[in-house]
Amino acid sequence: MQFGIFTVGDVTPDPTTGRTPTEAERVKSLITIALKAEEVGLDVFAQGQHHNPPFVVSSPTTTLGYIAAKTEKLVLSTSTTLITTTDPVKIAEDFATLQHVADGRVDLMMGRGNTGPVYPWFGKDIRDGIPLAVENYQLLRRLWREDVVDWSGQFRTPLQGFTSTPRPLDGVPPFVWHGSIRSPQIAEQAAFYGDGFFHNHIFWPAEHTQRMVEFYRRRFEHYGHGSADQAIVGLGGQVFMRKNSQDAVREFRPYFDNAPVYGGGPSLEEFSTQTPLTVGSPEQVIERTLGFRDYVGDYQRQLFLIDHAGLPLKTVLEQLDILGEEVVPVLRREFAALKPAHVPDAPTHASLVAAAGGGHDSTVHAADDVTGRTVETAAQA
């Protein structure tokens, strides 16, 4: 099972000091957090994609590429790649490039996002959200799997004889997760292709998450990808920890009360009861996280949100130390002991290459229109 962290890259004032970090500070902090995640033994770092304040993660592959050069084992992912408003050609190019930079340590999570105005900013209509997600992903899959693509659809200009470059590393595209909080159509899409399904598992009660995951599992089996319990599932979750639970609650409360997504709603205690938010001791986080299996079954990836709501970088790094030293080692051991042998691990580049019968150089050389020779051959003649 993979463990990691995900971030939305928000720039939020620290309610205890009144100070708001600069965008430069926040971008650099994301890099520091990712490097720390590898240092403490986590598996995955994922960041979102937004195009509006208060977020700084409009170009996730840029920072992920830098992080790739500074790490050796960390899987680099997105917690949202906006499949609805980002050109599939650009997604294909950017993530194939990142594959090469990171030696395959890349996957991504498709999502529609939760910012309505982003649609007109990129010339789209929010009412087309689901059809855009379906059509754009169909095109993206072809761009990664076919060397030359002829395509036409409803939402972008046609492609004729188009080759997306660079080609996927070893001829194997990155693994794709489909993220959704509330849309069964996205769970259906993930199941249809045999891709992973990720529920962010933050704002909704356990019963809702259970329904979404169960639906995805049933449809995964329906489409012949394996039994329902072999479907690839990921969960999010938010935690804040201190040695003593009372200290954790006292320290986190002002951040919760003033956070843009929480403030003015249910109390911290109510929210912790009604959703998977866990504020307390490491032991409480372990117990709560192990309980997720009771209603989603054996799953492959657990990501924690730990840097939201204006928490200072020093505090976030302390949270990573606790995760790496006290929480994740126990979770690894306990989840591994419970997982049946027929339930697969989370896909990696290495496992996907092995399943494909081995990797190969998928470079496509341009052909001369007249002679049919490659450009390289013609230049040498």
Image (cartoon, helix red, strand yellow):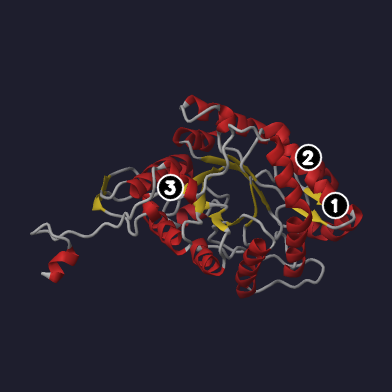
Q: In the image, which disc is placed on residue 353?
A: 3
User: Vertical placement of 273 versus 376: above or below?
Assistant: above
Q: What residue type is labelled 2?
A: Gln
Residue for point 48% across, 43% down: 129
The picture places residue 310, in percent across and down from the top left corner, at 73, 64
Residue for point 68% across, 40% down: 336
Estimate the spatial distance between the alpha carbons at disc 1 and disc 2, rounded to whole Å: 18 Å
Q: In front of the other: label 3 or label 1? A: 3
Q: In the image, is 252 to the left or to the right of 43?
A: right
Q: Is there CB contact under 8 Å for labels 3 and 1?
A: no
Residue corresponding to mark 1: 281
Secondary structure at badge 2 equals helix
Residue corresponding to mark 2: 274
Residue for point 48% across, 52% down: 119
Q: In the image, is 206 to the left or to the right of 97?
A: right
- The mark nearer the N terminus, 1 or 2, is 2
Q: Which amino acid does label 1 sit on?
A: Ser
Residue for point 47% across, 56% down: 104
Of 158 and 91, nearer the camera is 91
User: Which quadrant: the N terminus?
Assistant: top right
Q: What residue type is labelled 3?
A: Val
The picture places residue 220, in percent across and down from the top left corner, at 51, 30
Work out which residue is located at the far top of the displayed protein and give it: 222
